[in-house]
Amino acid sequence: MSWENQNKSITLKTVPSTTARRKCEICPLVQGLLWGTTALMLWHASKILGIPMFTFSAYLGGWQAVCSIAVGISGVFPRIALRGVDRGAAFVSHVSSPIRESWRYLPHWTQSSLTLLSGKPLAEQIPCPTFPRRMLIISFSEIAIGVALAWMAITGGGCWSVLSLGVVLTAHALRYLTLVIFHECSHLGFTGNALMDTLIGRILGVVTLGQSWESYRPDHSSKHHGKGFMTEDDPTVSFQRKFLGLQRGMSKFESLTRLLFLPLSPQFQFHLTTVRLVSCWGEPGWHRLGLSLFLTSLIALTLSWPFQMLVAWWIPCFVITNIGLAVRSCMEHVYPPRSAGKLNSRAARAICTHAVFFGSALPSSTLGRVGWICVMLFYHLPARALFCPGFSVVHDYHHRKPKAGILINPIFARQVALEGGPTEPYTEVWSLHAAIDAGLRSLSEA
């Protein structure tokens, strides 16, 4: 099904006027200067009065000033070309991939781990079964282990490697609970039992301190999987507009600068954290009662052990998760071209979604393989864990078959679909930066 066969009545967002655009470009610069001035005043006040809170506030204000000025500069000079970084062109998926095939020469016992890391199995690989109960047990155990490791690292004098591992484990488990289990529960496809999926979804809405089950499910079903897909009604597009300030036609340099700096800014973190808590609190009844008990327990622990709770729980739950939400919104889908009509069919909507696999081709030289191991462990593995955990790497398959569930492993189910010769070809990108590049480039051309 080609774009030309779609209805031509798609509604595009009106391009802002020149005056409005100029105000949007200058505003971050003015904000940055104001934040910088405030940070300097707080810094001098802390030196005179000796108040530690002023020093901490000065650091936050200074970093906010850097982020705002960087965003403002990208808006003033939107025509800067990013040469050599157009790597996000998706290519048609086949049963075998050149990058994945280059790993075939590694020992046989590593292939299952490489499939888990990359999200792309070998053609002849036996599917791994999925067990919903085991997935829940592993996720909550990972949170417990992550919090314990971070807590012990802080209490025992601060071993940075153990502390980092604990924070990453907790953040990964929370992202997995949200992107895989909570998401599948919203489609009633996690356990296959509607009542059980509803119960698990409501519990996870409280534990992850994100959007409640009652508000997420109708938005996701009608707007993200319905006629509102990749329009202003889509929650993904709405997130980009509201929190990152991304607009159709924005240059890739400006949108990339916003993605790099805004999620790290205190203003973004405070705004998104507030919105998450308000959204989570907004549902009355049993949800609010469970949330009240959970938050009371967390606050009591924080008052007793403030620094341990800050690093072991609050930073993974909010700071890292907020960054993950921002990055995921820019890599999960691509915008349809202007020539596209309304995305009325499921196959047409799936064209706006690529599979995102992780890894790079295995070099032939020994030195090259040492570098390959470092890149896989310290770039692709953390990116996979924080931004595309579990089955979320094959989000294109999910949009083609949203009711398929996870009782059949979606990673291998997609492979079976490739073997059957799909009517509309599946597409894929390899690595985090390629997925982000594809999303932002489609935004600039939309």
Image (tube, rainbow, N blue to C red):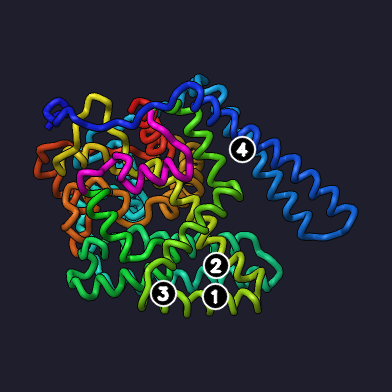
Residue shown at the point (42%, 50%) measured from the top left? 387
Query: Considering the image in quadrants, where does the C terminus appear?
Result: top left
- Quadrant where the N terminus sits is top left
Give amino acid for label 2: Trp
Q: Is residue 358 above or below residue 75?
A: below
SS label for mark 2: helix
Q: Which residue is mark 2?
A: 313
Disc 2 vs disc 3: Cβ atoms closer than 8 Å? no
Residue position for label 1: 298
* Magenta residues, start to end: 226-248
- Tell me residue 69's x, y (percent): 63, 34
Does 29 sit above or below residue 178?
above
Question: Of the numbered discs in the image, which one, if any, rests on residue 68?
Answer: 4
Mark 2–mark 1 CB contact (< 8 Å): yes
Nearer the N terminus, badge 2 or badge 3? Answer: 3
Q: Which mark lies nearer to you, 2 or 1?
A: 1
